[in-house]
Amino acid sequence: MDYSLAALKLLCGQLKDARGTPSQSALTLGGILFQRGVLVSNDDEDHLLLDDSTGIVELNLSGDFRQRQWKTGMYVMVVGGYFVRTGDIPVIKVHKIVDLSPFPDREAMWYLEVLEAYKLFYQPLIEEFI
């Protein structure tokens, strides 16, 4: 993990435009190089699928995260490495997952944070790249 690369605030649907890079274990989104990102959403007990209504991503949990009871409908924040899989839904190797269900106002704020970050930081770089 290269912590000098950006940690983008993104929705699942935005990750579908990310592309791998040949020389690094990183991805690029419109010219912005990143290796980790943050997503907030619900999960599914069977396959631990994250769905934020813009897309679906599978979660790869390890260690202590597997011991917790993750229930359908929980509102969670996930930080981790994003991996594109050809012919399958993408996967996030979870580095951090937090249950935000007790804080229902966080969901509305998340969409505003993503929108603000996109307009202030990512959009100008992406438009410049295109």
Image: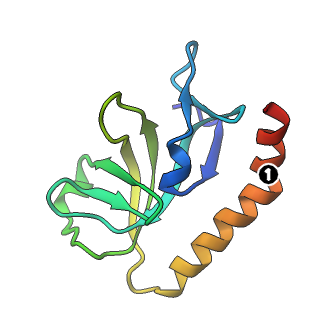
* Residue displayed at 45% across by 39% down: 82
Is 119 left or right of 1, judged from the image as shown? Answer: right
Q: Residue at x 27, y 49 (%)?
A: 61
Amino acid type, callout 1: Phe
- Mark 1, other Cα within 10 Å: few <14 / some 14–19 / many ≥20: few
Name the residue at the top extreme: 23
Write down the residue under mark 1.
121
Q: Secondary structure at mark 1?
A: helix
How is the structure coloured here?
A: rainbow
Seen at 45% across and 40% down, the residue is 81
Image quadrant holding the C terminus, namely top right
Q: Is residue 88 above or below residue 121?
A: above
The structure residue drawn at horizontal position 63% and vertical position 49%, both measured from the top left corner, is 8
Front residue of this view, candidates 107 and 14: 14
Horizontally, residue 94 falls left or right of residue 113, namely left
Q: Position of residue 116 (x, y in %)?
A: 74, 65
Give residue 46's quadrant in the image.
bottom left
- The vertical placement of 96 against 32, above or below, is below
- The residue closer to the viewer here, 92 or 3, is 92
Give residue 102's position: percent from left, percent from top: 40, 86
Specify whether 9 is left or right of 81: right
Q: Which of the 4 quarters of the picture holds residue 125?
A: top right
